[in-house]
Amino acid sequence: MRDETKAILADLIAFPTVSADSNLALIDYAADRLRQCGASVSIFHDETGQKANLFATIGPDVDGGIVLSGHTDVVPADLTGWSGDPFVMRQDGDRLYGRGACDMKGFIAAALAMAPHFARAPCRRPIHFAFTYDEETGCLGGRQLVGALKELPFRPAVAIVGEPTSMRVIEGHKGCYEYTTTFTGRDGHGSEPDRGVNAIEYAARYISRLLAIGDELRRTPPLSSRFTPPWTTVQVGRIDGGVARNVIASHCAVEWEMRPVSRRDADHVKSSLAAYCADELLPAMRRIAPEADITTTVIGEVDGLVPMDDNEARDLVATLTGSNSTDLVAFGTEAGLFQHLGMSVVVCGPGDIAQAHKPDEYVTLDQLAACLTLLEKLDAKTRDNSSAA
Ligand SMILES: [Zn+2]
């Protein structure tokens, strides 16, 4: 099993599935392996036809299944800092190097290696495989997949998202919502500011309102929040506008983000800002320049995973790994998408997030072995008629 996982990981790393590029070859590879062991496999393409999600089922088409979830895309790997080709797996001692080794092809390799075992005899509880595209660029694939899952005649109950947590059991993370808000005014000579519409000035008012909303959120964190910091944060990371000191700026773009602890907070921030633009900023701008505008582009809206008292996925994985503590992490995953579908969700996978997105990314054989042990115990559990799982 361990050699098999290693061989599959080498194959997966050799598909250069950088988010900007196609992941179809990898999806075909996974689909072949899953079909060979009798899984029913559905593939959902994006509108370009160059990327796809895979959803597969081993076992009966009934409610209550367990989803093993992983994204197939990886962040880019330019050669600086790498000791070898990022898309050729290289072993050095206990470490397997390659782009995506821990984030998160290691988990996908372990899941694929286990597929024939899940399939060797009928199981009561279906095991599903959900492999997505474009997680690293805003969970676009996950969003599409969740839309497709809503149409299924059955509803999985549990999702295990195998992002690298060093096999720790993670039950929550904040969301990450990213935007660029662009202000279009009217240019003019700096000596006559009232004849133009200064996009920078309106952007400044917008930022002030955003920060005021941030202060209000800081004063009202959810009572039970275990996040650090416990409230929803907002942040402006970059602004870009204007051409010169003595010219009224006709353009300004504000790049900002928030890390919501709940979707309610996220909706509050968005609707407050939208109302402020519609009721105050835009009318003031258009009194002078009817062509003035404010547009917000969504760069990514990755939902958080809200820690829940009642969480079967967490309890199941904690039992199987023998872990007696659960934790929160600072990075985003696709987990919140599954949670919004009404599933219980946990994040637990091989490898250390500290190695993700870096040159010489690796996963250790130890971590892969721990992941396989978890999946083997899961396999045993789904066949154990005496227990609830
Ligand atoms: Zn990842």
Image (cartoon, helix red, strand yellow):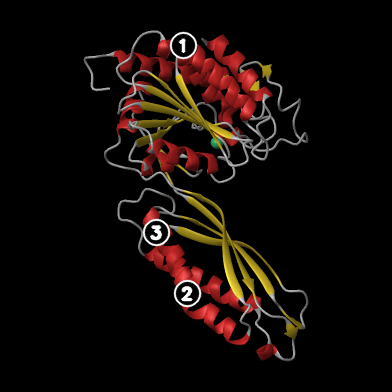
Q: Is residue 26 above or below residue 300?
A: above
Which numbered disc, 3 or 2, marks the residue that appears first in the sequence?
A: 3
Number of other residues with Cα within 10 Å of mark 1, as a class: few under 14, some 14 to 19, many 20 or more: some
For badge 1, the amino acid type reads: Pro
SS of the residue under disc 1: helix
On residue 265, the disc is 3
Q: Which mark is residue 116?
A: 1
Helix, strand or loop under label 3 = helix
Q: x and y percent of residue 51 in the render?
A: 60, 35
Q: Is mark 3 within 8 Å of ligand 1?
A: no
Q: Residues within 10 Å of mark 2 (few under 14, many from 20)?
A: some
User: Horizontal and vertical percent for residue 156?
Assistant: 35, 31
Residue underneath mark 2:
276
Foreground: 142 or 160? 142
Mark 3: which amino acid?
Asp
- Residue type, label 2: Tyr
Query: Mark 3 against mark 1, which lies toward the viewer?
Result: 1
Q: At x 53% / y 39%, what residue is drawn?
A: 141
Q: Are marks 2 and 1 in contact (CB under 8 Å)?
A: no
175 sits to left or right of 193: left
Identified at 77% across, 83% down, the residue is 246
Q: Residues within 10 Å of mark 3 (few under 14, many from 20)?
A: some
